[in-house]
Amino acid sequence: VAALRPAFNTLAGKQIEFGALMSSPFLLGILAATAVTALVAGSYPSLLLSSLKPASVFRLGGKTGGRSSVLRSLLVMVQFGLSIALIVGTAVVYRQVKFMQSKALGFDREQLVYIPLRGDAPASFPTLKDELLRSPFVPFVSGTSQIPTNISANSWGAEWEGKDPESRVLVGITSADFDYPETLGVEMAAGRTFRREFGTDNGGAFLVNEETARLMGLRPQDAVGKVFRFQGVEGPIVGVMKNYHYKPVDNPLEPMAVIVAPQGVRFAIVRLAGGDVPAALKQVEAAWNKINPRLPFDYRFFDDDFDQSYQTYRQMGSILKWFAGLAVFVACLGLFGLASFLAEQRRKEVGVRKVLGASSGQVVVLLSKEFTRWVLLANMIAWPAAYFGLKSWLQKFPARTSIPAVAFLIAGAAALAIALLTVSGQAWRSARKNPADALRYE
């Protein structure tokens, strides 16, 4: 445990100190788990042996009938069923993460950074913007009041002509500077973006997304020009932006509205030109140090923020991967012991078959056939359980991948191959033994 603790902390994203493992609650929990496991694992053989009748034991040579065989079959099926379900679950989790990472966000997140404006930096934002735009590496600069990758200020109170007075809807709101859609690379569905030549745009006009227009019961082109009231501001909708993910893609697309308010800017958004990104960042840093020499330069790539939002699911996939491997390993341990036991039980039968002309390959097939049936039955149980469990899990994602049939086939084939490899070695050893050793006393 001490050796594996750092690796486990990395895998689980935790910081568990070794001292925590020496605490009284943890040690008592381990002792309790050990005692319960021993009682549960030992209860069946104890009850089975205590229920045997001495006369039957001496007459049948210690054979206990079919009850233990049924339990063995069930245990093998449960172990491999769990293994198969975990393998399928791991594949689907990784598939969903890749799907989210590759999904179009509705804006161009490549070479897009944002800079937190701390201290008195917001007051100098207009000067910083002008300085940044002097660089050939910076085609667009804008600003916003919230972290651009997670706009969380949802509020009640949006009003428009024809709205049901009883209807209460949440709309995301952000204050921004001019050039907001151009910097993000958001396309317009209808209307125009904010323009400085229109004096009323500054604090008196709105940009909304397609989801807001849908909420209003209008097509994007019909929403342009409509009066919109929100957060104490009333003005026309001058443009409708195409929907874009301003939150991680495991969140549904939500209505949002943007209003020009340069005084409320708390984050500068900078679009870097293609080519030499390190050189572009040096230019941005130089502009920052010139305008805000007393404040440290700090920035984040949009890509990094979105990748970080998928970290939880990546960790889930990694944990499932290790649990699947561990489940397969434990199942193989049990299967190996069971194969050894059954091979020993059928030692005389194997000897007789060998004497009567059976080949080693035929004996291996005979001893492996029963296990193959159990693993195939485990697939029949694991597949529907895994499918409905994963289908329920995927429902939480507004944009989700499908559950591929090939994942079930690969997981089932892998479990069967692993089981046969585990069993066939023991079966081959039994088949290669001299039948005289088994029959010399008959």
Image: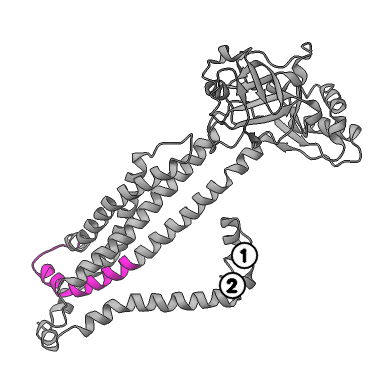
Percent x, y of residue 51: 19, 83
In the picture, measured across the screen, residue 292 lies left or right of residue 426, that is right
Q: How far apart are marks 2 and 1 (CA)?
A: 8 Å
| Residue nearer the viewer, 346 or 253 | 253
Decide: marks 2, 1 in contact (CB < 8 A)?
Answer: yes
User: Which of the numbered marks, if any, corresponds to residue 16?
Assistant: 1
* Label 2 or label 1, whichever comes before in sequence order: 1
Name the amino acid type tagged 2.
Leu
In the picture, measured across the screen, residue 112 lies left or right of residue 315, that is right
The answer to whether residue 354 is magenta is yes
Q: What secondary structure characterizes most of the magenta part?
A: helix
| Residue 432 appears in the picture as rendered | no
Kindly indicate the quadrant of the structure image that contains residue 64: bottom left
Percent x, y of residue 25: 56, 75
User: Which of the numbered marks, if any, corresponds to residue 143?
Assistant: none
Kindly indicate the quadrant of the structure image that contains residue 134: top right
